[in-house]
Amino acid sequence: MKVSVDEDKCCGAGSCVLAAPDVFDQRDEDGVVVLLDPEPAEHLHAAVREAADVCPAAAILLGDRA
Amino acid sequence: MALGDTDHVLDYPIPSPAALEPPAEWAELRQGCPVAHVRLPSGDRASLLTRYDDVKQVLADPRFTRNLDAPDAARIAANESGGVFNSGLGNALPEEYHQQWRRMVGKWFTAKRMTALRPGIEAMAEHLVDEMVAGGAPADLKAALGFPLPVWVICDMLGVPESDRDKFAYWSNTLLSLTRYTQAEIDAAQAEFAAYMSAHIAATRANPGDDLISELITAAVDAGHVMPAEALLATSQGLLVAGHETTANMIGKMVGMLLSDRTRWEALLADPTLVRTAVEEALRADANPGFGIPRYITEDAEIGGTVIPRGTTVVCNLAAANRDEDVFADAAELDLARTPNTHLAFGAGAHSCLGQSLARTELQAVLDVLLRRLPTLELAVPAAELERVDGLVVGGLQELPVRW
């Protein structure tokens, strides 16, 4: 799994951090998403998928490793 | 007359037969009439959206604006000015500055900060539960816990004394009026609120603290400009209204939903790790969140195969969308473990709720504390006897009588 985020779209809701705190954080200055781990380990995949699904701005993109 | 008939105009909000249940019309509209003609409390007409995909699309589409102060936009509330949505409050900042403002305020509401606030919020909840228990059963959980907790949190954040919370509750109610207050009452209350907050803002400028207002003032000074008093006033007004009534009512509705079928409460007692997903499910299943979100279009736009003409005011019914069977399996059922739960209770897109991490934290904290402290909690009246609050933009229960 390869994760990317679109900072321009991000609305700082923080729902990704609540769903997958090992993979997402927010910048202290403005609450914009920080991607901690673009290739998270297998056991985090379900939480990352949930974070992408619930993002109100659709700012999290998931792709295959390729 | 059938609901699908285009000449048929429904009165909106649509009354519901029971406090925690949705009106039957929502499912009929989703199936047969996804763009429905409705008459608002003001008497003006609007188009009502009830399908998940349509609502989500409109909320994220900048053509559907928040400019409900446009001359031909529908007024929402029954009073002259049309209420909070028509006041221009939502548009105190032009769209191009909105993101900048949002990020400035947003740093206060990051998930990390909210998680750091959680022990303090739990301590507040414990304190309020102690007081409720000391008063003896039965008690009204809404008055004892649901209302005071979020006001306490938001007053802390704005740096205003919590002892003024009754005033805030009244000001906030008048601002959220659909039919309850007259224009004169609303104007008087808003003038009082503006005077109170303006004095608070001036005092904060002179003597900054560690609250949000101080932070906004300081951040603007650091950036070489002065944060206009109107922007600060609009910010505090927005936070008061958004951070107060919504969560306060949601606490009562959430606990009401969980106790109305006590097997839900027991499932949470057996496995408290369900609290996070249970909160999301309560947000999704809330059949009484209030008015919904209005938008106004300045050009023709197509939604769900229907062309909506420019000049139309569209109302997004978030709660109807959250019960769309095409998106949520067994949408009418409460599944405390539902994952992912892509509900629209906080809206969607660039304007989705800024305070959603705070709301989630408060709801989770309250539920954790109640499960821990009052495992025997139950409704003190049959669920069918619970009554809704009427006449306000935000929906809730009049009371939530409980015993333990």
Image (spheres, helix red, strand yellow):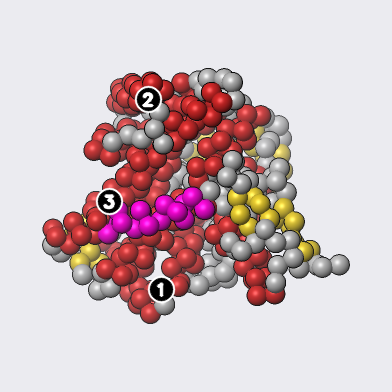
Say what secondary structure mark 2 lies in. loop
Viewer-nearest residue: B111 or B134: B111
What residue is at 24 percent from the left and 51 percent from the top? B143
Q: Amino acid at mark 3?
A: Gln
- Please report, as a chain letter, where disc 3 is located: B
Closer to us: mark 3 or mark 2? Answer: 2
What residue is at 57 percent from the left and 52 percent from the top? A14
What residue is at 33 percent from the left and 74 percent from the top? B262
Mostly what secondary structure, the magenta segment?
helix
Closer to us: mark 3 or mark 1? Answer: 1
Counting residues from the start of the chain, the first of labels 3 and 1 encountered is 1
The reply to whether discs 1 and 2 touch (Cβ–Cβ < 8 Å) is: no
What's the magenta region? B112-126
- Determine if residue B98 is in view: yes
Crowdedness of circle 2 by 10 Å Cα count: few (<14), some, many (20+)? few
Say what secondary structure mark 3 lies in. loop
Labels 3 and 1 in the same subunit = yes
Position of residue B302 in the picture relative to residue B380 (left or right): right
Viewer-nearest residue: B223 or B7: B223
- In percent of width and height, residue B349 lies at 63, 46
Q: Which residue is mark 3?
A: B398
Viewer-nearest residue: B23 or B269: B269
Q: Which residue is mark 1?
A: B272
What residue is at 82 percent from the left and 68 percent from the top? A65
Crowdedness of circle 1 by 10 Å Cα count: few (<14), some, many (20+)? some
Marks 3/2: CA–CA distance: 40 Å
